[in-house]
Image (cartoon, rainbow, N blue to C red):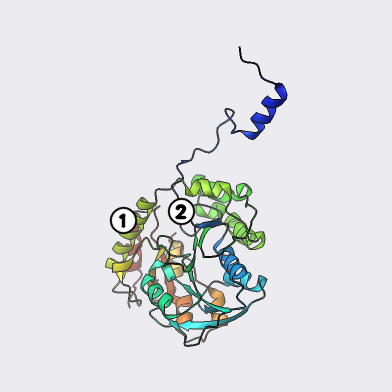
C-alpha cells in the first residue's frame, strides 16, 4: 500500500497534466507546424509592430496597394510613413536611399512574387517582407519576414515572424476561445451564417494589441497536413491559369508558385465580381481604401476595381475549379 501526504498530493496534481475528465476537441498533437523556429504571434499586423519596436525604426516606406490594417502598428509606434507605387510586375517604383533608421516593406502579393522578393532583398537595406499572402515561402536569410495563418487556415488568430532581434520582446499569450463561433458555424451552416461574427473578430483583432499566439490556434496549426494543402492549392491554381490566362491581364509566372493564397484574375468585364458573388463564388476586394492614396488611372486603382481573387484553397478540388471556369465563360468575359 502506497501512502501519500494529502497536501503534497494536491500540490502535485495542480502542477501536473490533467488526467481523465471530459474530452476536449480532438486535434493532432504532433506539433506539425510549418514555420518551426519562428516567433508565434497573434496577427500579421502585430508582427510588423514587433519588428518596428525591436529595430527602433522611425520611418517606413510601404506600397500604396496595401490593407489599411497595416497602418495600425505604424500609427501605434508613432512612425513616419511614405507610400510608394508598384509597376504591373508588382515591383517597387522606388529610388530613394534608405537611411539606417528607416525600413522598406514589400508585400509578396497573392503569394506569386517570390522572384521580386529575391531581387528586393539584395537591392535595398532594412527590408521587411510581408508574406501574409505567401504562407509556404520560407524567408530569405536574416530578412525580417512575417506570415498570416488566418489567410490560409481555419483559425481566428495566428501569425509567424522571422526576425533577428535580441533579446525578444516578452509578450502575454492571446486567448481565442471566445472568438471561435464563426468557424464552427461555417461547418454546421453556411458562410453567411457566421459572416457577422467573422467581421466582429476582424475588428476585435485590431484592438487586442501585440500578443503571442493563442494555445488553441497553436494546437490547430499543429494538426494540419501542410504538404497536402500546398499540393491542392498548386493544382487548383494551375487549372484556373490553364483555363483563364487568356482572359487574365496579369502576366503570371507559374514556374514559381508555391501554395499561393488565391488565383489573381485581373479582368475589366463589368460587374463580373458581383455576378460571381451572386452565384455563391465569394471573392473579396483588395483594398478599397487604396483609392484614396493613388490616382484613378494608376495600376493600384485598377487592381482595386478589377482584380478578382479566385479561391483555390484546400477546401476545394478540380471539380470546384471547373464550376468557376464554366461560370466565368458563361458571363461573356473577354480580355
Please name which of the two marks, 2 or 1, marks the residue nearer to the observer.
2
N-term-proximal mark, 2 vs 1:
2
Residue 255 at x, y percent in the picture: 28, 68
> Label 2 vs label 1: CA separation?
31 Å
Q: Are marks 2 and 1 in contact (CB under 8 Å)?
A: no
**Left or right: 195 in relation to 271:** right
Pointer 2 local density, CA inside 10 Å: few below 14, some 14–19, many at least 20? few
Q: Dot 1: what SS?
A: helix
Q: Is residue 185 visible?
A: no
Residue located at (54% from left, 74% from top): 288
The quadrant the N terminus occupies is top right
Residue 120 at x, y percent in the picture: 42, 77
Q: Is residue 217 above or below residue 87?
A: above
Q: Which mark is residue 307?
A: none
| Residue sticking out furthest to the top | 1
Residue 207 at x, y percent in the picture: 67, 62
Residue located at (51% from left, 83% from top): 84
Pointer 1 local density, CA inside 10 Å: few below 14, some 14–19, many at least 20? some
The quadrant the C terminus occupies is bottom left
| Residue sticking out furthest to the right | 7
Residue 104 at x, y percent in the picture: 51, 77
| Nearest to the observer: residue 302 or residue 135 | 135
Q: Is residue 231 visible?
A: yes
The residue that disc 2 covers is: 36
The residue that disc 1 covers is: 318
Amino acid at each position: 500500500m502506497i501512502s501519500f501526504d494529502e497536501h503534497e498530493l494536491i500540490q502535485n496534481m495542480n502542477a501536473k497534466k490533467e488526467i481523465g475528465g471530459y474530452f476536449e476537441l480532438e486535434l493532432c498533437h504532433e506539433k506539425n507546424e510549418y514555420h518551426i523556429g519562428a516567433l508565434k504571434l497573434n496577427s500579421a499586423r502585430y508582427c510588423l509592430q514587433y519588428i518596428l519596436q525591436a529595430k527602433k525604426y522611425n520611418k517606413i516606406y510601404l506600397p500604396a496597394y496595401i490593407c489599411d490594417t497595416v497602418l495600425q502598428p505604424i500609427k501605434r509606434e508613432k512612425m513616419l510613413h511614405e507610400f510608394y507605387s508598384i509597376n504591373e510586375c508588382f515591383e517597387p517604383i522606388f529610388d530613394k536611399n534608405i537611411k539606417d533608421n528607416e525600413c522598406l516593406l514589400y508585400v509578396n502579393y497573392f503569394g506569386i512574387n517570390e522572384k521580386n522578393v529575391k531581387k528586393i532583398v539584395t537591392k535595398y537595406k532594412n527590408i521587411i517582407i510581408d508574406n501574409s499572402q505567401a504562407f509556404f515561402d520560407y524567408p530569405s536569410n536574416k530578412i525580417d519576414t512575417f506570415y498570416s495563418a488566418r489567410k490560409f487556415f481555419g483559425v481566428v488568430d495566428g501569425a509567424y515572424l522571422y526576425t533577428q532581434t535580441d533579446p525578444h520582446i516578452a509578450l502575454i499569450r492571446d486567448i481565442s476561445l471566445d472568438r471561435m463561433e464563426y468557424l464552427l458555424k461555417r461547418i454546421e451552416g453556411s458562410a453567411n451564417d457566421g459572416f457577422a461574427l467573422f467581421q466582429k473578430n476582424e475588428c476585435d483583432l485590431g484592438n487586442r494589441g501585440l500578443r503571442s499566439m493563442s494555445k488553441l490556434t497553436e494546437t490547430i496549426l499543429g494538426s494540419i497536413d501542410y504538404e497536402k494543402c500546398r499540393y491542392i492549392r498548386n493544382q487548383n491554381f494551375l487549372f484556373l491559369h490553364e483555363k483563364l490566362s487568356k482572359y487574365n491581364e496579369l502576366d503570371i509566372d507559374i514556374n514559381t508558385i508555391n501554395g499561393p493564397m488565391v488565383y489573381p484574375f485581373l479582368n475589366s468585364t463589368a460587374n463580373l465580381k458581383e455576378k460571381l458573388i451572386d452565384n455563391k463564388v465569394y471573392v473579396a476586394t483588395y483594398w478599397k481604401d487604396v483609392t484614396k492614396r493613388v490616382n484613378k488611372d494608376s495600376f493600384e486603382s485598377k487592381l482595386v476595381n478589377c482584380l478578382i481573387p479566385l479561391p483555390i484553397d484546400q477546401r476545394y478540388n478540380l471539380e470546384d475549379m471547373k464550376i468557376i471556369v464554366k461560370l466565368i465563360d458563361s458571363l461573356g468575359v473577354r480580355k
